[in-house]
Amino acid sequence: MSVSPPKALSDRTLAALAGVDELTTVRERDLTSPMSPDPVGTLHVLRGERIAKVVRIGLTVDAIGMDSHMIFAFTGAESAVPHFTLDSVRAGGYLAYHIDLVPRADLGAQLEYVNAVYQPLTPVFEEVRDRFGPSAAAIGPRQHAMMSPWMLVDRADEERFEQIGAYLDRYFEHWRDLLVKGVPDGVLGALDGAALAARDARNRAALFSPEVDPVWANVARLVGDGQAEELRRELLTNDLPEEDAAHG
């Protein structure tokens, strides 16, 4: 059975993550829907040493032409290294991708952080823009505010979607270097681990808010409110839901 282009890109990214860190699956479950007698997707949660938590969500429903695969690789709560994310999707008759390194500090107030963490991505970002033009993806201004200005996000035909893999690799290689070597000393000024953790909690609460991202309404229609909320909770914190309950 052939693997769809969105899943192939997601599989390749998960394999690259496993090449950076020894990942252990800590949770895996099927996602169900009243739309189908068979599972419509899967949730995988993994942990590593350098990578605090990987959340992978796949949703595939042939009847409505949807094939969506999302990966978030979260760094530690007190780390300055960005989170890595990939969305690869077929829906509504088109392919789409979203690749980014999610900031751990407010970029407008941290020029040295921008220079160290994001400026090296500029040649890749500009090459994608020059080659493919402005993005046609439906991403609102609030969502842009919670990601980085170097985010690659666009709809694509089959040819362009295949080509984006090379740019994904370059983003990933830069992120891998940051993960292994760490953010250079001194680039965050007075920001300490506690401040980074507090900002990350606020940013993730906004980034994965149903108010901000309309995708959660679509997910809830597909798998129900309970499973949608379960998926969202996995993304809000590096803890597992059971750990959340224990902390409470």
Image (spheres, rainbow, N blue to C red):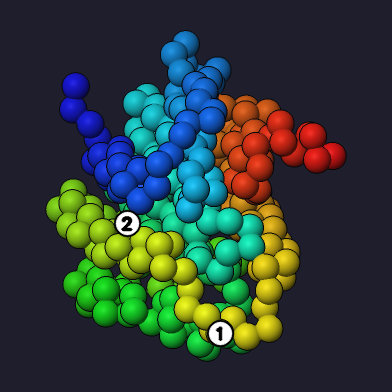
Q: Which quadrant holds residue 168?
A: bottom left
- Which secondary structure lies at badge 1? loop
| Earlier-in-chain disc, 2 versus 1 | 2
Q: Position of residue 155 (x, y in %)?
A: 32, 56
Q: Is residue 167 left or right of residue 84?
A: left
- Which secondary structure lies at badge 2? strand
Q: Position of residue 20 (x, y in %)?
A: 35, 51
Q: Which quadrant holds residue 221?
A: top right
Image quarter in which the C terminus is found: top right
Asked if the residue at tag 1 contacts the one at tag 2, i.e. Cβ–Cβ closer than 8 Å, the answer is no
Image quarter in which the N terminus is found: top left
Q: Which residue lies furthest to the top in this view?
A: 37
Tag 2: amino acid? Arg
Q: In this view, does 241 lie to the left or right of 219?
A: right
- The residue carrying mark 1 is 186
Q: Position of residue 55 (x, y in %)?
A: 50, 41
Q: Which residue lies furthest to the right in this view?
A: 248
- The residue carrying mark 2 is 155
- Mark 2 residue crowding within 10 angstroms, few (<14) / some (14–19) / many (20+): some
Evaluate whether residue 97 shows in this view.
yes
Task: Give the spatial CA distance, label 2 vs label 1.
Answer: 38 Å
Q: Residue furthest left?
A: 159
Write the residue at 44% across / 57% down.
84
Write the residue at 55% across / 39% down.
218
Between residues 165 and 172, which one lies in front from this camera angle? 172
Query: Which of pointers 2 and 1 indicates the residue nearer the eye?
Result: 1
Q: In this view, does 74 lie to the left or right of 20?
A: right
Q: Is residue 233 left or right of residue 58?
A: right
Write the residue at 63% across / 85% down.
189
- Mark 1 residue crowding within 10 angstroms, few (<14) / some (14–19) / many (20+): few
Q: Which mark is residue 75?
A: none
Tag 1: amino acid? Gly
